[in-house]
Amino acid sequence: MRGVRRVALGMALSFFVLSLGLAYWQVIQADTLLKDKANRRLILMESRVTRGGIFDRNGEIIAQTQTSNGKKVRVYPKGEMFEPLLGYSTLKLASSGLEGNLADWLLGIKKVSPTQAVQKLFALPRQGDDVVLTLDSRLQSIAYNALKGKMGAVAALDPRTGEVLALVSQPSFNPTNLEENWTDIISREKDRPLEQRYFSLFPPGSTMKVVTSAAILRSGINITDLYECKGSAVINGQIISEQNDKIHGWVNYNMALANSCNTYFATFGVQAGEKNFLAAAKGFGFGQKIPFELNIPTSSITKATVIPTKLTTNLLAASTFGQGEVLVTPFHMALITAGIANHGVIMTPQLVERVLDPAQNIKFEQKPQPWLTALTKEEAAKITSGMVTAVTDGTAAPGALSNVQVAAKTGSAEPGGNVQTHAWYIAFAPAEAPRIAVAVIVENGGTGGGAAAPIASQIIQEALSQKVGDK
């Protein structure tokens, strides 16, 4: 009898473990499995479900399914303008980008309506849900054309809501006739057309000085005091040089930010201390997972630890102006810029505005939510003042607009090796009541003012002239 009991107990335990595993994979990990390219169920589902459409915020078609000669074909009217963000969906190549990440909505299997539930139960042909994005095709087009022929990325947001208005990565690819052209696309190793560069990690260069500004402001350092820039400074035996060994002379905080004075920020960043610097970086989202529809690599301060507890003096000095080991994504840099614009509050970024069922009833609608409070209103105002000075009387002047006050910061980041610096430009406008925040990077483009600023100014001009983002 004892042996029987043991066998029965063992079988019961086995069934219990199997039940837990089944529940884990079918309930907890259901969405993950659904979006996995290897999931044959998803591929089979495509044969009887007509994918919903993907639209921009103004109702322009970005992706839709059409039937030709009895065969369903996914059509992308905007060509490569939204790639690689939009991704693709084919039976042979599965799906990627938004086509993959939003598959549960597009196939009508997330928050199913009663009609969809019946159709799903009896495996009937059915229509998926339509997804309306926060993106604006007009801004996407401006950014795409301005960046075309270069390698880099653009991210633009509404700082008031966190809505993503444009996401462009260049070079990209044309999703039309994708299966036929796939070999050619993946062979473009130098171009990396499948890489979403707005989510790639780069050294931020001098755009990092807006983060360091928070540490300096909180340390009690008087930002009206003058500092003499002599073209270089020695900190703990390490020589900190200005770009092209430029001597800025006597500068206060505003002029140091405007002229992108490395020695000022290294000197006072070290004086402010590692605790203030690391706290400021964490407050802006370094070392934290960005809540978003797509996966974004975490921005970091060091290679070993995304947010370390300590920094050597030399590494701290280099980090204050975005060198050392600091890495950040252009998308995150746009969020940082938006946080300064929004009086210190970084809103949760949003890419999906709403989801509509086949009868065009709203199934889901985003609501603006704060993510981080990076600055006080007073701190944000002081950094904004420095960024305005950068446009009126500093390195960010190439991004100025005649009809509106822009607040901006340039960056020239050294990627290592014998290549040109990456050109950065972050900006928001109007400075007094911001409606758009932008981050632009041109890989190996040289100076931020020369290569990236003209791209940002075109986007800002279009956004403000069309009142993009206003409801």
Image: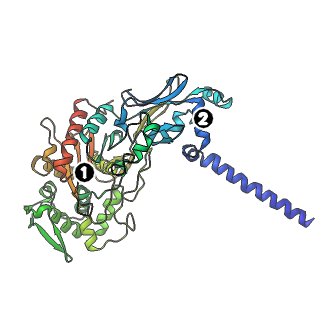
Of residues 45 and 194, the one nearer the viewer is 194
What residue sits right under mark 1 in the picture?
380
Q: Residues within 10 Å of mark 1 (few under 14, many from 20)?
A: many
Q: Is residue 401 left or right of residue 332?
A: left
Q: Earlier in the sequence, mark 2 or mark 1?
A: 2
Q: What quarter of the picture does the N terminus occupy?
A: bottom right
Is there any visible trace of residue 317 in the rendered image?
yes
Determine the CA span between mark 2 and mark 1. Answer: 50 Å
Q: Residue at x 14, y 54 (%)?
A: 258
Q: Residue at x 8, y 61 (%)?
A: 248
Quarter location, residue 160: top left
Q: Is mark 1 on a helix, strand or loop?
A: helix
Quarter location, residue 17: bottom right
Above or below, comparing residue 274 to residue 398 in the picture: below
Q: Residue at x 36, y 55 (%)?
A: 285
What residue sits right under mark 2 in the picture?
45
**Label 2 amino acid?**
Met
Residue 326 x/y as whole percent: 31, 62
Which numbered marker is on residue 194?
Answer: none
Residue 11 x/y as whole percent: 81, 58
**Label 1 amino acid?**
Ala
Q: In this view, does 96 lie to the left or right of 191?
A: right
Outermost residue on the bottom side: it is 237
Question: Which numbered disc, 2 or 1, marks the residue closer to the eye?
Answer: 2
Residue 262 x/y as whole percent: 17, 63
